[in-house]
């Protein structure tokens, strides 16, 4: 007996032509749906993005994250569910293609004749295994969505329909196999282990009834399978395509993650930012369509956790609904602001990028929020009273506090700090407004200077000529003010021949390193953590591991998540503490914001305080010292320690303070 099976067994030649006919219809319906979707994506403004740039990186990113689920598996339970479904269907799709190529119509054309003997047996086994994986994945998805109902998932009819449809397709496939095996009963079909066992259900039926039942299951399975393929373009299943493509677009970035995109036509534009959905570019529109509503972004959003009116998932979905409405011809007279996204929602974001970094398909939220902020700030001149004051201070005094140049250098009294304008030095220490003007953070500047002097580093500061880096203006949407500041800074730095910059502030670090190249400033920029570790490794400073007590480290968003500096601060702490560095539950990529970014540090808090939530994380570690590497985080965490009356059990220190005290 041949170890193989007859394709179109029992259903005959008519079924063969019908199958090919349905296949053509299915792909026409699918293609039409995709074409309509494509036209909808195109309502956005053209973007300069070029998919062919770094194409091999994009493909390899997709293989790692799309095929092998690296980002999706960051959360094991939903990750497992998805990988079972994906791999089950992936293998079934390959198997179906192999079967199609074996058919009498395609086999002579392609000359493939492999579905026999040992290959057939392995093939049968793998296909049944794939089917079981897909069934398991579907059942887990149904259980999770409709029985466990995690808060972050909303269940639309489309989700239920898709899952039930998928399950019926899979089960009907096994019924087709089971009835065929029951009717033909060759021993080798035991390799189709599911079909073999399903066949036992039908073992007492006569051949005629089995044939009719098989034909019924076969036609049902064929129609349902083609149906669901066509349905892809009209349902949430479209994410199979959009999420895969978006991973390749967003996962491999052409510019650094921390750099906000400039306004392209800034000199000539009549209005700035976005208030109509079609004013977003096509990549941004595509993001909206690629969102799978998984809610991972919402789980990690500090604004959402502190009960502000912002959920990144809802933000994206609200924009998506508006896009679908407008792209389908709906009226588009009212703007997005207040009608789709409220002003309070817009200002609630801390720009921490937790949503984007932890989104399995890297969908950015802040790139859209910043456009709404720009519209409010630049086009409508409608900001909050706090941001108005912030802009005024920056415009008039060049710092967010409005304290002015003279106070900027007060912290240097009695310290050995040169001015780069007076003496040639290797490094510029860019102090930043907070370390220059905030009393608590001035101690950090002094500690860093102590370290640099101790290591014999040739450095200087800009003194009273240092201005804000512009980060607060930019993240509050005032691109005009930011550009003025950034361009002046770049001009001055170039004039002074500055090449290498050190900074204790991750926000200054991000602006100088990632954003200043947009205005012609290209410098070597080091955050204190990288530079101190380098000094230790080179033996220029020696630190002792004498620090008692439990230490925990809070990742500043703009150091860790945005610039991926995670290990240098930890390596320094490990060298100084007696090995008692304990991680908080949320750390590295999943670290929780202090609440100070995105201009929020300059705004009143009307909801739960984000820093209070974060200090609870630190408290759970029983840490006696909380270390961070950002002036905003230092202020926010210290405030939280005071508010929560933890001062007698926990100190908050900056990395430089920790290092400086360990070198004396
Ligand atoms: S950037 Fe941070 S605060 Fe803003 S939506 Fe994303 S997670 Fe929330
Ligand atoms: S933006 Fe990303 S993380 Fe958030 S719901 Fe959509 S797919 Fe999930």
Image: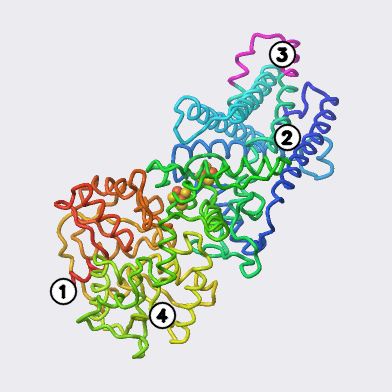
Mark number displayed over residue 664: 1
Residue 571 in the magenta stretch? The answer is no
Q: Residue at x 42, y 74 (%)?
A: 525
Q: Which class describes the residues within 10 Å of circle 1: few (<14), some (14-19), or many (20+)?
A: few
Callouts 4 and 1 close, C-beta under 8 Å: no
Seen in the picture, residue 482 relative to 429 is either above or below; the reply is above
**Residue that badge 3 annotates:** 210
Callouts 2 and 4 close, C-beta under 8 Å: no
Q: Which of labels 1 and 2 is toward the front?
A: 1
**Residue that badge 4 annotates:** 500
**Range of the magenta residues?**
197-216
Query: Regarding mark 2 in the picture, which secondary structure is present there?
Result: helix
Q: Which of labels 3 and 1 is toward the front?
A: 1
Residue ranking furthest to the bottom: 423
Instruction: Specify the principal SS of the magenta part.
Output: helix
Q: Nearer the viewer, residue 130 or 439?
A: 439
Query: Regarding mark 3 in the picture, which secondary structure is present there?
Result: helix
Query: Regarding mark 4 in the picture, which secondary structure is present there?
Result: strand
Query: Regarding mark 1 in the picture, which secondary structure is present there?
Result: loop
Mark number displayed over residue 125: none
Q: Is residue 140 visible?
A: yes
Residue 228 on image: x %, y %: 69, 31
Locate the N terminus and report the quarter of the image it occupies: top right
User: Could you give the CA–CA distance between mark 4 and mark 3, rounded to whole angstroms?
Assistant: 80 Å
Seen in the picture, residue 610 relative to 652 is either above or below; the reply is above
- Please tell me which of labels 4 and 1 falls first in the chain: 4
- Please tell me which of labels 1 and 2 falls first in the chain: 2
**Residue that badge 2 annotates:** 230
Q: Residue 504 falls in which quadrant of the image?
A: bottom left
User: Could you give the CA–CA distance between mark 4 and mark 1, rounded to whole angstroms?
Assistant: 27 Å
């Amino acid at each position: 007996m041949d170890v193989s099976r007859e394709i179109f067994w029992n259903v005959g030649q008519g079924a063969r032509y019908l199958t090919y006919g349905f296949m053509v219809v299915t792909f026409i319906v699918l293609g039409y749906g995709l074409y309509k979707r494509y036209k909808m994506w195109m309502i956005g403004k053209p973007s300069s993005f070029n998919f062919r740039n770094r194409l091999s990186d994009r493909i390899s990113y997709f293989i790692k994250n799309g095929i092998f689920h690296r980002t999706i598996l960051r959360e094991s339970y939903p990750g497992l569910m998805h990988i079972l479904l994906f791999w089950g269907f992936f293998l079934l799709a390959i198997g179906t293609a192999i079967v199609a190529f074996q058919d009498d119509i395609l086999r002579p054309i392609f000359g493939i004749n492999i579905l026999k003997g040992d290959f057939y047996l392995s093939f049968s086994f793998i296909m049944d295994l794939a089917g079981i994986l897909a069934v398991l994945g579907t059942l887990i998805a149904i259980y999770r969505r409709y029985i466990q109902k995690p808060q972050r998932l909303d269940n639309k009819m489309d989700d239920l329909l898709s899952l039930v449809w998928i399950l019926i397709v899979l089960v009907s496939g096994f019924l087709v196999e089971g009835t065929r095996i029951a009717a033909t009963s060759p021993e080798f079909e035991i390799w189709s282990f599911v079909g073999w066992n399903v066949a036992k259900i039908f073992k007492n039926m006569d051949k005629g009834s089995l044939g009719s039942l098989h034909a019924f299951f076969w036609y049902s399975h064929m129609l349902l399978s083609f149906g669901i393929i066509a349905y892809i373009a009209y349902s949430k299943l479209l994410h199979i395509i959009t999420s895969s493509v978006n991973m390749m677009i967003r996962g491999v970035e052409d510019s650094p993650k921390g750099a906000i995109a400039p306004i392209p036509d800034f000199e000539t534009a009549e209005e700035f930012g976005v208030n109509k959905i079609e004013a977003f570019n096509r990549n941004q529109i595509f993001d909206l369509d690629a969102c799978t509503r998984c809610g991972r972004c919402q789980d990690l959003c500090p604004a959402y956790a502190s009960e502000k009116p912002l959920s990144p998932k809802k933000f994206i979905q609200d924009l998506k609904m508006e896009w679908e409405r407008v792209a389908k011809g709906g009226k588009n007279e009212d703007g997005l602001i207040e009608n789709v996204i409220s002003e309070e929602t817009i200002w609630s974001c801390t720009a921490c990028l937790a949503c984007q970094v932890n989104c399995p398909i890297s969908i950015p939220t802040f790139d859209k929020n910043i456009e709404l902020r720009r519209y409010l700030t630049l086009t409508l001149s409608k900001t909050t009273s706090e941001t108005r004051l912030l802009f005024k201070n920056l415009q008039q005094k060049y710092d967010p506090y409005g304290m002015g140049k003279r106070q900027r250098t007060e912290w240097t009294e009695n310290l050995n700090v040169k001015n780069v304008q007076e003496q040639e030095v290797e490094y510029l220490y860019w102090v930043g407004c907070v370390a220059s003007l905030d009393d608590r953070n001035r101690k950090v500047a002094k500690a860093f200077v102590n370290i640099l002097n101790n290591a014999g580093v040739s450095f200087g500061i800009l003194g009273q000529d240092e201005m804000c880096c512009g980060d607060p203006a930019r993240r509050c949407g005032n691109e005009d003010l930011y550009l003025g500041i950034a361009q002046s800074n770049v001009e001055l730095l170039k004039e002074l021949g500055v090449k290498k910059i050190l900074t204790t502030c991750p926000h200054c670090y991000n602006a100088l390193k990632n954003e200043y190249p947009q205005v012609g400033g290209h410098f070597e920029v080091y955050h204190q953590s990288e530079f101190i570790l380098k000094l230790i490794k080179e033996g220029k400073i020696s630190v002792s591991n004498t620090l008692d007590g439990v230490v925990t480290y809070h990742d500043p968003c703009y150091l860790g998540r945005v610039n991926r500096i995670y290990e240098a601060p930890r390596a320094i702490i490990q060298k100084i503490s007696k090995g008692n560095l304990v991680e908080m539950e949320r750390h590295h990529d999943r670290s929780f914001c202090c609440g100070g970014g995105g201009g929020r540090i300059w705004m009143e808090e009307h909801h739960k305080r984000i820093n209070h939530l974060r200090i609870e994380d630190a408290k759970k570690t029983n840490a006696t010292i909380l270390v961070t590497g950002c002036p905003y985080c230092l202020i926010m965490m210290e405030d939280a320690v005071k508010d929560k009356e933890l001062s007698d059990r926990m100190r908050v220190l900056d990395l430089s303070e920790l290092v400086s005290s360990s070198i004396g």
